[in-house]
């Protein structure tokens, strides 16, 4: 989709509303580097909506968005100073803070996935059903370092199953669809919304989707992360980024076509139908049931503290960080702006 067509499809705004605040104040926008957790898809479409519709510039920001190499790598990118902001897994952040107690912390500032979209997807012709117990003796593909694999012991414990119920087959992210289609493995771990590429190659009736949330494991997933330096020195920039991003998230939830148009602006080769299906799944995890109470982007401190303790046990950490250390709630947009209206 060409840029002029994308912009033409967006709701009209007044000239005064469209004028970036930084320009109105006669100041140049401040550059910020933001890293995704992975490649460009509808999973992270709101950030591109905010970029293309000028929401970041309205906040006086010149945001650049780069692809990532995993939700764990995003943490080290932000911690190193290479990026000021990123999208990364909050369980992995708990591990990072526990292992680096003397260094400047990276903190979560907005909970993107209100529930982690962790799932194991299995082939029904290999005996994988809707029950986690059906994975007994199976071969499950997963990347060497990924949270879906690493928090499996929490699912096993919740379900009363042994942690070694099945055998892991270490597989690159990009190869999981292929090993599933070929039948090299019986199942594979996925972010649920990442599995639409597999769904496009194998009919739904041939697959069983075992969601970790269905196992009674309620974990927060990827969050927007900020460097401690940025939080300490320029918190207003973080607050502006969150206002712009939250605005776009709310719009994408209300109008999914915006999400697809934005990512296809960045990656024109993306399939529109596939990305609509992907966003439909993503939206379920962004606007999980408890966002009706505390709004998008926020967390229940007690639930996050529980997650940190559970992750500490699963990852073999000596201690677990507190919910306050993991998550800085002070810069969230007002609750009224974060309420789900779909």
Image (cartoon, grey):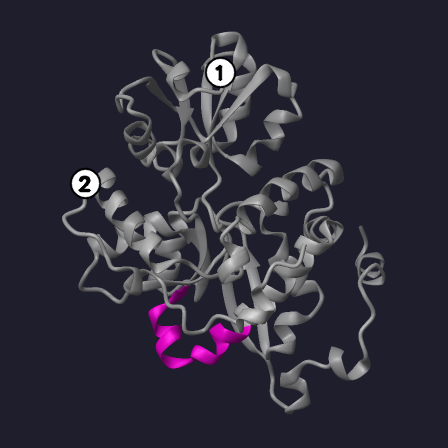
Q: Is residue 99 visible?
A: yes
Number of marks in picture: 2
Q: Is residue 274 left or right of residue 7?
A: left
Q: Is residue 103 above or below residue 14?
A: above
Q: Is residue 110 above or below residue 239?
A: above
Tag on residue 316? 2
| Residue at 46%, 46% in the rendered image | 115
Does residue 238 belong to the magenta stretch? yes
| Residue at 18%, 46% in the rendered image | 317
Q: Which residue is mark 1?
A: 129
Q: Which residues are magenta?
A: 226-240
Who is closer to the viewer here, 14 or 85?
Answer: 14
Residue 86 at x, y = what percent? 46, 59
Tag 2, which secondary structure?
loop
Residue 288 at x, y = what percent? 53, 48
Residue 328 at x, y = what percent? 37, 68
Who is closer to the viewer here, 160 or 127?
Answer: 160
């Amino acid at each position: 989709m060409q840029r002029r067509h994308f912009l033409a499809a967006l709701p009209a705004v007044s000239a005064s509303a469209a004028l970036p605040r930084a320009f109105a104040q006669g100041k140049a926008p401040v550059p910020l580097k933001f890293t995704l957790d992975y490649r460009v898809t509808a999973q992270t479409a709101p950030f591109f909506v905010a970029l293309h519709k000028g929401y970041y510039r309205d906040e006086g920001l010149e945001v650049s968005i780069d692809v990532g190499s995993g939700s764990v790598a995003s943490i080290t990118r932000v911690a190193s100073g290479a990026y000021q902001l990123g999208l990364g897994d909050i369980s992995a952040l708990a591990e990072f803070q526990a292992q680096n107690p003397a260094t400047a912390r990276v903190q979560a500032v907005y909970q993107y996935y209100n529930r982690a979209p962790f799932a194991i997807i299995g082939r029904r012709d290999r005996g994988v059903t809707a029950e986690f117990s059906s994975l007994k003796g199976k071969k499950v593909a997963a990347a060497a370092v990924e949270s879906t694999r690493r928090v499996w012991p929490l699912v096993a414990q919740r379900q009363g199953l042994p942690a070694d119920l099945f055998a892991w087959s270490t597989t690159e992210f990009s190869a999981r669809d292929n090993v599933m289609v070929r039948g090299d493995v019986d199942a594979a771990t996925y972010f649920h919304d990442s599995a639409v590429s597999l769904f496009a190659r194998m009919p739904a009736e041939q697959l069983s989707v075992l969601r970790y949330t269905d196992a009674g494991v309620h974990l927060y997933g990827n969050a927007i992360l900020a460097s401690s330096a940025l939080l300490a020195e320029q918190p207003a920039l973080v607050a502006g980024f969150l206002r712009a991003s939250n605005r776009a998230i709310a719009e994408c939830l209300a109008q999914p076509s915006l999400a697809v148009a934005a990512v296809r602006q960045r990656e024109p080769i993306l399939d529109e139908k596939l990305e609509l299906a992907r966003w439909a799944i993503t939206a379920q995890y962004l606007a999980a049931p408890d966002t009706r109470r505390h709004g998008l982007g926020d967390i229940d401190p007690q639930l996050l503290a529980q997650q940190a303790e559970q992750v500490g046990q699963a990852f073999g950490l000596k201690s677990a960080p507190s919910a306050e250390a993991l998550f800085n709630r002070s810069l969230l947009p007002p609750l009224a702006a974060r309420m789900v209206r779909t």
